[in-house]
Image (cartoon, rainbow, N blue to C red):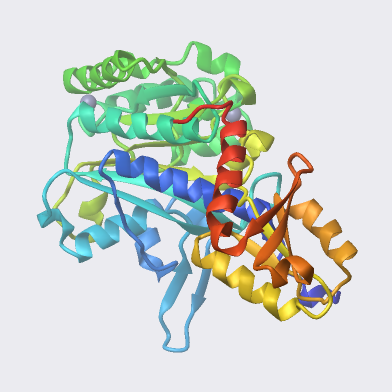
Amino acid sequence: MNADLQRPKGTQDILPPESWRFDKMRRIALDTARLYGFELLETPIFEQTQVFMRVGESTDIVQHERYSFIDAGGVDLTLRPEGTAAVARAYVQNGMYNWPKPLKLIYWGPMFRRERPQADRYRQHTQFGAELYGSEDPGADSEIILLACRVVEQVGLTNPDVRINSIGCAICRPNYRKALVDYYSARRDELCQDCQNRLEKNPLRLLDCKVDVAIRQTAPDLADYWCDDCKSHIESVMAQVSQVGRPIRRDPYLVRGLDYYTRTVFEVGHPSQGPNTALFGGGRYDGLSASFEGPGAPAVGFGMGIERILSAVGDQFPPDEAPLIYVAHLPGFMGQAQIMAEQLRNQQLATESDLLDRSLKAQLREAGKKARLALIVGGREWEQKTVQVKDFANGQQHIVELENLPLFLKDRLRDESQDTNGGSNL
Ligand SMILES: [Zn+2]
Ligand SMILES: [Zn+2]
């Protein structure tokens, strides 16, 4: 195919069965969030560019990785690179600060960043996120962390590894920032080029560096600078999460990149991915809604890249399979087979019939590959208002009266689901 007709670099076509894994993941994420009383919010996939500039002007995403364009009306628009800013914009614009508190919101959809393409990183990727507005209480942070853990556990990543830190508040963080800058400035010549830049622009991210790890070992610890409120906040979050039986540990070097965080930052990983690796993360951003000229509201949330999660789960997360019925036919009965298929679909039975008018042998060969049961329409059985049923699970054949057919098929398919659940009726 000509290069200029191919899909853009860094994007993907999600083909079956992978597309069904995405669909299943979406259902699990949304259903799990509903267990906690979260509501689904859909915002446009593009916003006025200012929406993203307001919240992250100094971040790489907003500086270098934006997909922005001027539309025919001269409006500066950007494909959303993340969910939190758009949710905050919607929260203020729709007056949701007047809704009963706390407000628990989830979103699901595509995000766009012009990243350097690499494994599991796409220029269009899917994100699931949760945002809890209106509560400063540590209970809001623990609720968000518990939801995050439950979602990944539901898709097979049991015992997630949660690391948490507090980057302090407007009262205590400036003191820490100063101590950190003083410490690193004294060692400026030993720092990598990235850290020399961070020292000017975003000193907290000095702790993120994977190169200068020896220097950071003796760097000032945030915990020594927390004010009393920040200290008791993180201690309560950790105690609460632990009390429901979820392991959580403090990571003194966890700061996360975004400008708008206050106090809580956290990352969720999994032992199967190695120690200290993050599948996704989140945090608290109490000042964000005030950036949109709304009343300031405390908020805490996370954003989860779905491609990354599905890649981590691998084969342990197969798509749900519809136990298909295939309606085959003898010569001259193709139309009857399609009518039969449609009647079975009326009974919510997933059914296909042959649309190529193939030989019976060819039809049954295909049925054996994709279906659990095959029916054969036509012949002497048909004259006697019966149909032949082939069960591929055990090779048995049955002659079934047409009026009993839906019940018979449902019984067969129920047997199968019991087999795969180890005989449980639950
Ligand atoms: Zn503080
Ligand atoms: Zn460095």
Which percent across, then down, holds residue 259? Answer: 38, 43
Question: Would you say 222 lies left or right of 312 here?
Answer: left
- Residue at 60 percent across and 59 percent down: it is 114
Question: Would you say 352 lies left or right of 364 here?
Answer: left
Q: How many labels does the image show?
A: 0
Position of 253 relative to 321 (above/below): above
- Residue at 39 percent across and 60 percent down: it is 53
- Residue at 39 percent across and 48 percent down: it is 30
Which percent across, then down, holds residue 311? Answer: 65, 40
Question: Would you say 139 lies left or right of 265 here?
Answer: left
Q: Quadrant of the N terminus?
A: bottom right
Which percent across, then down, holds residue 276? Answer: 55, 22
- View extreme (front): residue: 384
Which percent across, then down, holds residue 369? Answer: 80, 52
Foreground pick, 297 / 74: 297
Tell me which image quadrant ligand 1 sits in.
Answer: top left
Position of 314 relative to 345 (above/below): above
Any part of residue 235 in sight: yes
- View extreme (bottom): residue: 72
Foreground pick, 143 / 33: 33
Position of 194 relative to 381 (above/below): above
- Residue at 75 percent across and 54 percent down: it is 370
Position of 382 relative to 102 (above/below): below
Any part of residue 59 in sight: no
Question: Would you say 187 lies left or right of 323 here?
Answer: left
Quadrant hosting residue 88: bottom left
Q: In which quarter of the image is the C terminus?
A: top left
